[in-house]
Image (cartoon, grey):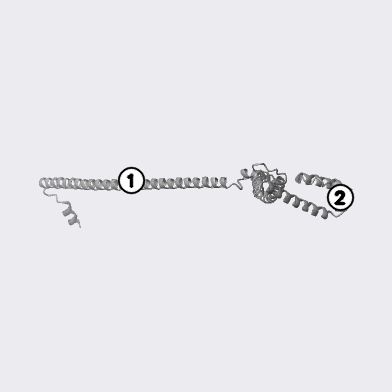
Amino acid sequence: ERWLPLLARVGNTVRQFLPAAKDITGVKLMQISGGSDYEKVREYLRLRAVEAYWDKVAAVEEQHPGCADEAQRYMFLQNLDGKWKQHLQDMDDLKNEVQFQMYAERDPLVEYKIQGNYEFVELFKSMRRDALFSFYRFIPPPNLAEVLRVGNPRQDSEAAKRMEEEGKTNTQKKKEGEEDTAELIRAAAQASRQMNEAKKNRKTEDSSLTSSRTEEEEEMAMKTADAANEAINKGIEELQAQFPEMISTSERTTSRG
């Protein structure tokens, strides 16, 4: 009798998942277990869950042929989308929380890996549980085939046609974009070549101006040097005329040598 409250809670949970399993109560589960063999209870609940699943598939297929698999896929993806977003948020929160493990002299990285693995396993458990719960409680609407786009050749053909047109449009836009990009590249390359040619021409002009200026400067320097030499020679000649006893510097140097 001490296990009866626990089995009663199990029966309540099963009835929440399986609306058709109203006969599953704590008393019935106690009778199935025989008071001690709870593996019989587990096997019984597993069989009832599988039976309820196939009954739901048959009911959906009877009302909307070909829609049962698509409905399950839709519900699973809906659960996956919401659960995955929440999982990413939980992992961000965990990243901030594990920093406090340093105060307990624990490695935050190790704690993050342990807790992250636990969160990931729980994510898949909750996705399977919620997807099954949604399917067990699922009541198909009258326009299920239209919502899931199943079994309507006209809609499928129209959707395929729209997708094909969108694909062609995207391809054309991509092609035009590539052509515009290629044109810009060609224009940039041409502008670069023109700039390089202009730089080369400017350098040539500068070098020619520099060379012409250098020649003029050298010529001017030579003329200045010649004039200076002439002035020096003329001064020497005048000194020699006034003072014949003076000799030239070269002669003086030679006599000393």
The residue shown at (77%, 53%) is 47
Work out whether residue 105 can be spotted: no
* Near-viewer residue (136 or 181): 136
Q: Secondary structure at mark 1?
A: helix
Q: Residue furthest top?
A: 142
Instruction: First in sequence, mark 2 or 1: give its number.
Output: 2
Query: What's under tag 2, amino acid-wise?
Result: Met
The residue shown at (27%, 48%) is 204
Work out whether residue 226 can be spotted: yes
* Near-viewer residue (225 or 149): 149
Q: Position of residue 213 (x, y in %)?
A: 23, 45
Residue 182 marker: none
Image quadrant occupied by the C terminus? bottom left
Query: What's under tag 1, amino acid-wise?
Result: Met
Q: Position of residue 63 (x, y in %)?
A: 68, 46
* Near-viewer residue (40 or 177): 40
Q: Position of residue 191 (x, y in %)?
A: 35, 45
Residue 195 marker: 1
Disc 2: CA contacts within 10 A as few (<14), some (14-19) or many (>=20): many
Q: Secondary structure at mark 2?
A: helix
- The residue identified by callout 2 is 30
* Near-viewer residue (69 or 45): 69
Left-right relation of 134 to 239: right
